[in-house]
Amino acid sequence: MTTISNVAAQDSALPKVRVDLLPLLLVPVLALLMLPLIGSFPTWVTLTVAGLAMGMMVFMMASGLTLIFGLMDVLNFGHGAFVSVGAFTATLVLLPMKSWVEADSILLNLSVLGLAILLAMLVTGLLGWAFERIIIRPVYGLHLKQILITMGGMIVAEQLIHVIWGAEQIPLQLPTTFRGAFIIGDAALEKYRLIAVGVGLTVFVTMFLVLNRTKVGLLIRAGVENGEMVEALGYRIRRLFVGVFMAGSALAGLGGVMWGLYKETLTAAIGGEITVLVFIVIIIGGLGSVGGCFIGAMLVALIANYAGFLAPKVALVSDILLMVTVLLWRPQGLYPVAKR
Amino acid sequence: MSEPLLQLEGVHTHIGQYHILQGVDLLVPKGGITVLLGRNGAGKTTTLRTIMGLWHASRGSVRFAGGDITQSPTPEIACAGIAYVPESMSIFSDLTVRENLFLAARGVKSADQMDEARLEWIFGFFGALKKFWNQPAGTLSGGQKQMVAIARAIVEPRKLLLIDEPTKGLAPAIIQGMIAAFRELKQTETILLVEQNFSFVSALGDSVAVMDGGRIVHSGSMAELTEDRDLQHKLLGLSLDTHQ
């Protein structure tokens, strides 16, 4: 008997599924277009890798937010709080275990970074659970109140960080073996940026597999499109909400650790400062779209790096200009998510 | 009449400041098709959404299979055995036909575990679904999307199907196919069908209830209503002749 899953493949009369490749091509096309403008191939490689690394870190912070908005219709302006809390929580591991950070051993360095990430994700995930229950739940469906209360939540979180860790900047040391750069030809590829690219790609691939290959992932995608129908099929969307909020918060925490180590100093405002960029990325990508968020993050970061090199004054507004251009082309973002 | 599977007694539903259902009394017997007729705004869709728990009754009771579901949350009502096909179909357009049906099959953990015999039974009604099995549902035509929506409701056995205006916006040829499918379906399923297309439901319905102004104003057998043109005119402002 023919298996049902193979039927479509055997039928040559099937209409082709339209795959929208244009946004996917934007990143390589942009990079290639910049090569002649930059002039030097090694400089272009360095800038491109730096842009991709920054893009991956922004993606980590933004991916949770786009899912939270898509599934729960919640405008969480307090998302940056999880970035800050994640980065500061990492200091609870990185500072006391300074000997592992300073050790010239990749194993110890990776272990200490892994521990810091694990603790940060655990704390921000739990904080996300509390944030959803106490702050978000009373304002479902009320966008204005969501904006006000989540911004308020972020201010409270920043002040709590001041209370716990003090108002001074905290220097965050990169583990020894992550310092420096690989020199390939004349191009310098910073090790930590390559690690950030690796972590970002791992997050993206994991999210892609979960969203496309698991029932929970399909429920999240279906819930983004029509939560009411997911409930009518017998699933408690509230549990999905909580799970996604916790995962999104934990991802922001992960992004916070990576971003904090990238900047090598921490202030309580680290999350608030990145929030605008994160919102630009999810708007460019299409609210609720993880794939769009990934491309949006790469575009924003690459353009910021290229513009910083070619025309530093333009770099100050490059992300806004990019957002305006994308929205003029596709008003719903690169990959708009179908809504009921 | 056999024992009712679903019973609404004096159900009132408010949506914001609007008082939509104003004391609905409705019996749905086990087996066959009960048709809910009425003009636009009579409260048919609100009745289905109230049964499904998407809007909660402010007064009255909804009993299903012997239990009170008046204030039950929607997922609990679905798990009790009621499937819902909304007027808007509400298929997940980013998901394939296969994934749409997989999500409705609560009892399985992977799409490969779906009951193949039941899927073949569904493909017997809606052959296009087999053809478009791995297509994103959003790329299908309106009629095919309706097939996905109904297939999703019957991918696992359910005690009651609530189906809201399945022929809305569909071409006559597709409606004929749908009539044949519903004739088959009613042999095994209990269906509460909301429709405005009288010629469609007159060929299918076993019992009928007519709504007006948020209340049931007539209930009886479909055969009786089909034969009585004066009653049709009185209740619906039409007769079968003019509506065909």
Image (cartoon, coloured by chain):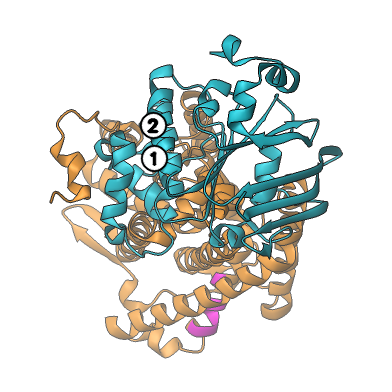
Chain colours: A orange, B cyan
Q: Nearer the viewer, residue A35 or A155?
A: A155
The three-letter code of the residue at mark 1 reads Glu
Q: Nearer the viewer, residue A185 or A152?
A: A152
Task: Indicate whether residue A83 is drawn in magenta.
Answer: no
Say the numbered circle drawn on residue B184. Answer: 1
Task: Indicate whether residue A89 is drawn in magenta.
Answer: yes
Chain containing mark 2: B
Query: Seen in the image, is A104 located left or right of residue B226?
Result: left
Q: Nearer the viewer, residue A110 or A138?
A: A138
The image shows residue B83 at horizontal and vertical percentages of 53, 50
Q: Is residue A225 visible?
A: yes
The three-letter code of the residue at mark 2 reads Ala
Q: Nearer the viewer, residue B226 or A242?
A: B226
| Residue sitting at x 70%, y 77% | A166
Q: Is residue A76 visible?
A: no
The image shows residue B165 at horizontal and vertical percentages of 56, 31
Whole-number angstrom distance, CA of label 2 to CA of label 1:
6 Å
Tell me which segment is drawn in magenta. A86-93
How busy is the neighbourhood of tag 2: few (under 14 within 10 Å), some, or many (20 plus)? few
The image shows residue B227 at horizontal and vertical percentages of 61, 22
| Residue sitting at x 49%, y 34% | A333
Q: Which residue is mark 2?
A: B180
| Residue sitting at x 31%, y 52% | B118
Looking at the rendering, which quadrant does residue B3 occupy?
Answer: bottom right
